[in-house]
Image (cartoon, grey):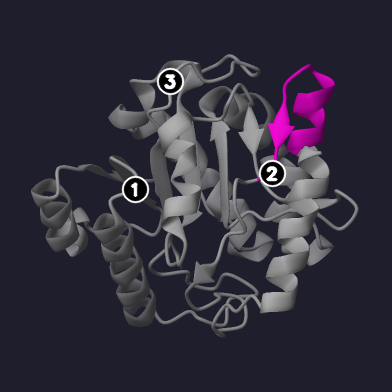
C-alpha cells in the first residue's frame, strides 16, 4: 500500500475506483437496500462508465461478499473495449452497519488501495478518481480531464460546500498518498448516529492536507450524477440554477 501522505501525481494515468455494497444488510440510513435492485444499479452504472471509455483503468471494490462472477459480463465488455478492469473483494467483517454507509465506504477505499494491483502499480502518486459505484456521470467527458492530465500537481480535487465544511464524496480525485495519509485516518470518527458523515471527513482531510503543504482545487466541471440515492431511494437531480451557481463558484475560486 502507498504510504507517503503528500505526494502529488507524476502521471496522468488515472484509475476510476467504483465503491460497491450489493447487500447493505442492516446499514442505517439506507432506503435503497434490496440487493437485487442494488446489483442492477451497479451493473448498469459500470456499463455506463465502460461505454463512455473515459478512464482506461477501472477498479470495482465490493464489501458485502458477493462473487466477482456477478460482474463477469461487464468485465468482458471492458476487455473488448480495451479497458483494464479489476474486481477487488473487501475483507469480510470490516463494516459497522450502525455507523452508516460512509464508514463502510472508507473501508472499501482502504481495501482497494491494499488489494488492487492496478492502483498499487502507480505507487503513492497514483491518481484515483473515486466514484460511488451505483452512479454514473451525464458529463463524463468533462470529468475525464482528470484522466487526461491528472491532478495538475494537486493532492486532491473535489467540490467543497457549506462554508468548506463538507465535500461531495460521490465523485472526487486524489493521489493514493492523500487517501492513505489524510482521508483514511479520519474513518474512526465517521458515525451517522453522530451526524459525522463521509462528506465531513473528506473536507477535513482536504484541510489537513493543505495545512501540510499539499494543494487542492475543485473538480473541472460540475458533476451531473445519474442514479438512485441510497439514503432516500430517489433519483439524483441537479437543477439548472444550481448547476449555474456551482459553475460560477468554480470560476470565482479559480480567479
Going from N to C along the chain, the mark reached first, 1 or 3, is 3
Q: Nearer the viewer, residue 142 or 107?
A: 142
Report crowding for label 1: few under 14, some 14 to 19, many 20 or more residues within 10 A (C-alpha): many
Q: Position of residue 175 (x, y in %)?
A: 54, 28
Q: CA distance from mark 2 to mark 1?
A: 19 Å
Q: In the rendered view, would you say 99 is above or below 209?
A: below
Q: Which quadrant would residue 231 be assigned to in this image?
A: bottom right
Q: Residue furthest bottom?
A: 234
Q: In the rendered view, would you say 110 is above or below 97?
A: above
Q: Position of residue 251 (x, y in %)?
A: 76, 48
Does the magenta-highlighted stretch encompass residue 216?
yes
Q: Secondary structure at mark 1?
A: loop
User: Which residue carries the number 3 mark?
Assistant: 11
User: Which residue carries the number 2 mark?
Assistant: 218
Q: CA distance from mark 2 to mark 3?
A: 19 Å
Q: Secondary structure at mark 3?
A: loop
User: Which residue carries the number 1 mark?
Assistant: 54
Give residue 98's mark: none
Q: Which region shows up in magenta?
A: 205-218
Residue at figure coordinates x 59%, y 62% from the top left: 101
Amino acid at each position: 500500500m502507498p504510504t507517503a501522505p503528500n505526494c502529488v501525481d507524476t502521471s496522468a494515468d488515472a484509475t476510476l475506483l467504483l465503491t460497491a455494497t450489493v447487500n447493505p444488510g442492516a446499514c442505517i440510513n439506507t432506503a435503497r437496500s434490496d440487493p437485487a435492485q442494488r446489483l442492477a444499479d451497479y451493473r448498469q452504472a459500470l456499463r455506463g462508465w465502460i461505454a463512455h471509455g473515459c478512464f482506461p483503468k477501472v477498479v470495482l471494490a465490493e464489501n458485502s461478499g458477493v462473487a466477482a462472477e456477478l460482474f463477469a459480463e461487464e468485465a468482458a465488455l471492458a476487455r473488448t473495449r480495451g479497458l483494464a478492469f479489476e474486481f477487488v473483494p473487501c475483507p469480510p467483517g470490516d463494516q459497522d452497519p450502525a455507523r452508516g454507509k460512509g464508514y463502510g465506504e472508507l473501508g472499501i477505499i482502504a481495501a482497494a488501495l491494499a488489494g488492487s494491483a492496478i492502483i498499487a502499480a502507480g505507487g503513492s502518486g497514483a491518481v484515483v478518481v473515486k466514484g460511488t459505484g451505483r452512479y454514473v456521470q451525464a458529463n463524463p467527458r468533462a470529468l475525464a480531464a482528470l484522466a487526461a492530465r491528472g491532478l495538475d500537481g494537486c493532492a486532491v480535487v473535489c467540490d467543497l460546500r457549506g462554508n468548506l465544511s463538507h465535500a461531495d464524496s460521490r465523485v472526487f480525485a486524489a493521489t493514493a498518498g492523500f487517501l492513505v495519509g489524510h482521508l483514511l485516518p479520519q474513518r474512526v470518527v465517521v458515525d451517522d448516529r453522530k451526524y459525522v458523515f463521509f462528506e465531513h471527513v473528506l473536507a477535513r482531510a482536504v484541510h489537513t492536507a493543505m495545512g501540510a503543504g499539499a494543494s487542492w482545487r475543485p473538480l473541472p466541471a460540475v458533476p451531473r450524477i445519474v442514479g438512485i440515492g441510497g439514503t432516500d431511494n430517489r433519483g439524483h437531480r441537479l437543477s439548472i440554477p444550481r448547476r449555474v451557481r456551482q459553475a460560477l463558484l468554480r470560476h470565482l475560486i479559480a480567479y
